[in-house]
Each structure stands twice: as C-alpha cells, then as structure tokens.
Amino acid sequence: MTAPIFSAPTPDSAKLEVLRQHFPQAVEVDAQGRIRINATQLQMAVDPSNVQVEEDGFEMRWVGKREAYHSAFVKPNKILQPQPAQSKNWDSTSNLLIKGDNLDALRLLRQSYFGKVKLIYIDPPYNTQSDSFIYRDDFSASQAQVLEQLGYDRDNIDYIKNIYGARTHSGWLSFMFPRLLLARDLLRDDGVIFISIDDNEQAQLKLLCDEVFGQESFVASIAWKKRSSPDARDTLGSVHDWLLCYVKDPAVVKTAIGKIPLSTERVDSFSNPDDDPRGPWASVDMTGMTGRATKDQFFTVTLPSGKEIKPPAGRSWGLVEKTFLQMKADNRIWFGQSGSNVPRIKRFLSEVTGQVVPTFWDMNECGSNDEAKKEVNSLM
C-alpha cells in the first residue's frame, strides 16, 4: 500500500487545528516546515474498509492494521461492576482500580473521560522471549466477519489469526494500536503520555506513536537507567529502558510537561558568599552566542577592581547594557570575591521554580527495577 500526500500551501489555521485535534495521524510536517495532509490516514479514520492508495508515500504498514484500528471503536459490551467488599476505604478513596482486559477498560473509560485525563503512563508488554505477560486479544468468528467487511481476503484473515498472541512485530502492533488510539482520546488538551519500552520494539513504537499522536506531539525519548550493572551473559548488556513522551497539543508543551524539583545535588550547589539577604544563590554565565546578538550586547564592563573588560573572544554579553546596569544596581551581578572576575548573574534559590526535565534518568534519582519490586512487595 502507498499513501497519497497532498500539500496545503495556504492552510486555514482553524480548519488545520480541527484536523490536528481529531486526526493528528493525518497532519504531517516536512523538514522545511511545510504542512501535508495524508488523505489515506483520513480515509482510514472515517471508513477503513474503502482505503484506496494511488501514490507513493511514507507510512507504517502491517497486516491487520485496519482491523486493529476498527477494534478500538467497537461499542463496549461490558460494564464495570463495583466491588466494595474487595476495596479499601470505599467511601473516601479517590482512586480507581479496574480489573479486566485493558482494551475493554479503555473503551469504557472513553465514554466518561473523553478529553479529561492529564497524565497517562503505559507499561506494555515488551514483546521479548522473557516477557511473562502473554497479550492475547481473543480472535472470534465475529472478528473474521469484520475483516471480510474491511476488505481482507481469506489468506490475510488466516495470517491475522496466527499473529494474534504471537510474539511478532505485526501481532504486537495490532495489540498496541487500538489501545494508543483510545489513550489519545482520553488526554485533555494539556495532557501527556509516557510509554515504557526496551530496544526490541522501541523503533516500531516511535513510528506508531508518531501516527497516533502526530509527529509534532513527540517530546522526547527518555533513557532510564534501571539497573546498576549489565547481565554478564550479554554481549552488550542493557542497563536502561526507554520512555517515549508525547503531548496532546504541541502548542502547550511547556505547560503540559512543566519542571521537576531541583535535585539535592543542585540545591547543595547554592551558597551565599556575600551574605545577600535574599538567601542562597548560584552564579550563571553572563555571556551569550554572537550569532543572534545585537550591537547593544557588545559593551565595556568596568569591574569593581577598576579593570575594564569586553566580552570574551567569539562571545557577546547575554544581555544589553541597560539590563546589566539594572541588575548590577540590584546586586544581581557577581564579580568574584576579589571583584576582578568576569561578571556572572546571580540566580537565587528562592526564585527558582524547578529545573528542566532531562532526557536521562539515573536510578540514583529515579529508582531502579529492584527498588520498584521491593516497594510493590511491601505494599502487597
């Protein structure tokens, strides 16, 4: 199959936003920032049984994709049954644990929580030989009928039956696709989703999420160091997993992600050598790159020692002279104990709202697999 691609030279922003909100998989942006609408993806969303492809294009394909898409939006035929006797603090808890097939649970949640969920974390089966969780969506006669209606021939239907529950890329993708589609519908506008995975399916999951959430909604692939030492039996021993992060609306990514509290190490780096009444502070570089600097960022600074200096070679000051003088008057510039160092800006601990989330999470700060097992065991 190939995918027709149509360019949109002068897109209507309101209509484009509607497409991004409801069909992010159909809105593509190339390296030059040009917007393209993938008509096949729109057809897949509206009527997958009549998808017809006429031109070449880039997309992810596997046998069973149409059926996997269709299964996300099948009307749920199950209900949630309360279990007060098996629960803790039934009348006061704000937590909810749903026991059962997660695809059925997502279908039910979609009815009440469409566009209302701030954060979703998924820890799916990794599709490895050591994975003890067997993912099997039962294949029934009614699903065979659906496949026929979607245009699959008998050979493909038999193949799809075989890959259900099998540890193949196609089987795993067919398992993940409907669940991610439903998860996307649950996210609110400033919602975020994190998905754990290892190297075995990381590449496939990234492409699948690009299609489901939209390429522009991708935030980062986070490497989490989950153990201290590799397995001695491996050639290259893995000590990390991946966390793929996507947002519902890329226009509000900073608000959606936010910041994390300063680490203990970072807090300990603040001090108060000049006894500033505003408390501990840390100095940061006052220079900047010359590429975007204006002429107002090239000025002479007179140090408290009386020496005059200009920006270091190949650099500018990171602020204009007027701002520098205001900060200097407010004792926010540090010239060193001797008063003869290159000026640096004072950042006060009391004014720091947090730090940017890094894309490497060390087990010393974020915990390890062993610590997680111990915590779960203690709870259970």
Image (cartoon, grey):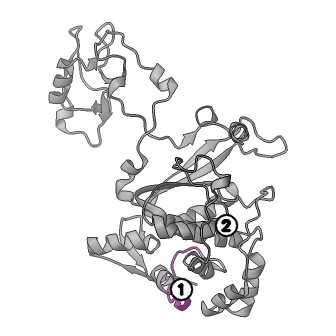
In this rendering, is residue 127 above or below 333? below
Q: Residue pushed farthest right?
A: 233
Q: Is residue 99 left or right of residue 359?
A: right
Pick the quarter of the image with the C terminus: top right
Q: Which residues are magenta?
A: 48-60
Is disc 2 placed on a helix, strand or loop? loop
- For this rendering, which residue is in front, 113 or 286? 113
Viewer can see residue 356: yes
For mark 1, does the 10 Å Cα neighbourhood hold few (<14), some (14 to 19), or many (20 or more) residues? Answer: many
Question: In this figure, what is the number of numbered marks?
Answer: 2
Which SS type dominates the magenta stretch? loop
Q: CA distance from mark 1 to mark 2?
A: 25 Å
Residue hosting label 2 = 101
Residue hosting label 1 = 48
Pick the quarter of the image with the N terminus: bottom right
Tag in front: 1 or 2:
2
- Lower sequence index among marks 1 and 2: 1
Is disc 1 placed on a helix, strand or loop? helix
In this rendering, is residue 247 above or below 297? below
- For this rendering, which residue is in front, 258 or 10? 258
Q: Are marks 1 and 2 in contact (CB under 8 Å)?
A: no
In this rendering, is residue 6 above or below 13? below
Viewer can see residue 348: no
Q: Is residue 279 left or right of residue 177?
A: left
Q: Is residue 131 left or right of residue 281?
A: right
Instruction: Please report the residue visible at 26 percent of the width from the left and 75 percent of the height from the top.
Output: 10
